[in-house]
Image: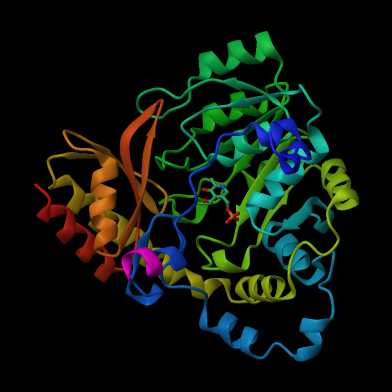
């Protein structure tokens, strides 16, 4: 072990190397595509971007707003969000993306050895943050159709007494929903339930459990501006919490965790929220176009989704090879090959033009 390595916490030193996320810079260097030539369908971003009102507001950001630290309490935004959701402002915590909010939940709730219940396949950051905070992972895999194994969850809760459970609704990577009855049972469990509504705006029908937060002292609901609002690059998301947990996070979070630009962009989005509806409708329409197009490709088995992406099982070919071939054409999709999710691709819903290009490229592959 080198001297430098000796300084590292064993937990970090012994972690396996993670596959680096393919950045726009690497796509340019390795494949020769400029960012605006790419069809980026690997991270469920919103290809239409932020509202014009947001871009205008950012352009007018005055110098004073850049050299002075941001508002540690994100007051203007939290006020808008409180009004929008009909909850007290004190319940809301804003972070540099939901990734930070998820990490903050671990920081205030999880001691070394506490148990984290996880239902894979699901968003990878829960297990990752659990490992970083030395939680013990209790895994209850989903069924083959990606629905929750409710009996398995009940048994694991009895046997292991986990403290925390994160569930995206719709789930990433399949886009499936939790039923009202499942939610009712989950909220009754003796654990802190975090409903991650990163993709909730893309559902065909109202699915949110935001109204339930005030009724349960063990329920958190998460939202992000990365997907529906097109602000992924600015990093801003939030949670609505039981009052005491929100207060605990406000006590320990880094004071200036959310940049001035991100706060402004999210506040302007909330002030113009009606104008985001047409874009969300277009994404839903293109989701159907994508699903219909994928159904014509006999080596793909795609799963209907309520989010802005579609998961496909790849048959008789390697998903990694397909993803690589697409990448050479400037099309980026997410490839999975893990227990419970072997040989699969997750494709984000893009613009009509992007969907045409992707479907044409897939149809060319025999
Ligand atoms: C289910 C889920 N939660 C949270 C996030 C993180 O969102 P953010 O960009 O706000 O960090 C993602 C991003 O892909 C996600 O899929």
Q: In this view, does 41 lie above or below 65?
A: above
Image quadrant where residue 117 sits: top right
Above/below status of 288 relative to 189: below
Q: In the image, what residue occupies the spot 59% across and 62% down? A: 225
**Foreground pick, 114 / 178:** 114
Q: Does the magenta-highlighted stretch encompass residue 29?
A: yes
Quarter assignment of residue 139 = top right
Asked whether, in this view, residue 275 is left or right of residue 62, the answer is: left
Q: Position of residue 15 (x, y in %)?
A: 62, 34
Q: Main secondary structure of the magenta part?
A: helix
Q: Against 203, is 314 above or below?
A: above
Name the residue located 24 percent from the left edge and 45 percent from the top edge: 321
Q: Does the magenta stretch include residue 163?
A: no
Expressed as whole percent of the image width and height from the top left, the position of residue 81 reads: 71, 62
Name the image quarter holding residue 192. top right
Q: Which residue is drawn at 57% across and 67% down?
A: 233
| Range of magenta residues | 28-32
Horizontal arrangement in the rendering, residue 253 relative to residue 101 (left or right): right
| Of residues 2 and 176, the one drawn nearer to the viewer in this rendering | 2
Furthest toward the front, the residue is 2
Residue 122: where, in percent of width, then height?
49, 36
With 349 as the anchor, is 108 left or right in this view? right
Q: Nearer the viewer, residue 242 or 20?
A: 20
Outermost residue to the right? 251
User: Which residue corresponds to the image point at 70% horizontal and 87% vertical from the top-left?
Assistant: 61
Q: Where is residue 188 in the image (x, y as percent from the top left)?
A: 68, 24
């Amino acid at each position: 072990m080198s001297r430098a390595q000796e300084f590292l916490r064993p937990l970090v030193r012994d972690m396996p190397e993670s596959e680096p996320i393919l950045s726009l810079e690497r796509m340019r260097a390795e494949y020769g595509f400029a960012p605006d030539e790419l069809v980026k369908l690997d991270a469920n971003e919103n290809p239409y971007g932020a509202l014009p009102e947001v871009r205008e507001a950012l352009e007018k950001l005055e110098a004073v707003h850049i050299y002075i630290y941001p508002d540690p309490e994100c007051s203007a935004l939290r006020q808008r969000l409180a009004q929008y959701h009909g909850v007290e402002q004190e319940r809301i915590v804003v972070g540099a993306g939901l990734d930070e909010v998820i990490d903050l939940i671990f920081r205030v709730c999880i001691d070394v050895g506490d148990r984290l219940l996880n239902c894979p396949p699901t968003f990878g950051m829960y297990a990752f943050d659990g490992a970083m905070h030395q939680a013990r992972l209790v895994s209850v895999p989903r069924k083959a159709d990606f629905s929750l194994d409710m009996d398995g969850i009940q048994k694991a809760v009895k046997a292991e007494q986990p403290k925390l459970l994160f569930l995206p609704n719709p789930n990433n990577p399949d886009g499936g929903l939790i039923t009202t009855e499942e939610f009712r049972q989950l909220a009754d469990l003796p654990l802190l339930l975090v409903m991650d509504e990163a993709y909730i705006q893309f559902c065909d029908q109202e699915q949110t459990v935001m109204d339930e937060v005030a009724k349960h002292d063990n329920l958190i609901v998460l939202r992000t501006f990365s997907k529906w609002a097109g602000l992924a690059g600015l990093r801003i998301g939030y949670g609505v919490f039981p009052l005491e947990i929100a207060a605990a996070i406000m006590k320990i979070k880094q004071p200036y965790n959310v940049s001035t630009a991100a706060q402004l962009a999210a506040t302007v989005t909330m002030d113009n929220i009606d104008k985001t509806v047409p874009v969300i409708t277009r994404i839903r329409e293109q989701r159907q176009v994508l699903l219909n197009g994928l159904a014509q490709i006999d080596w793909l088995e795609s799963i209907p989704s309520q989010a802005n992406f579609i998961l496909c099982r790849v048959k008789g070919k390697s998903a990694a090879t397909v993803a690589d071939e697409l990448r050479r054409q400037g099309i980026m999709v997410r490839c999975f090959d893990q227990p419970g999710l072997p040989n699969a691709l997750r494709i984000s819903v893009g613009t009509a033009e992007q969907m045409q290009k992707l479907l044409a490229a897939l149809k060319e592959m025999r």
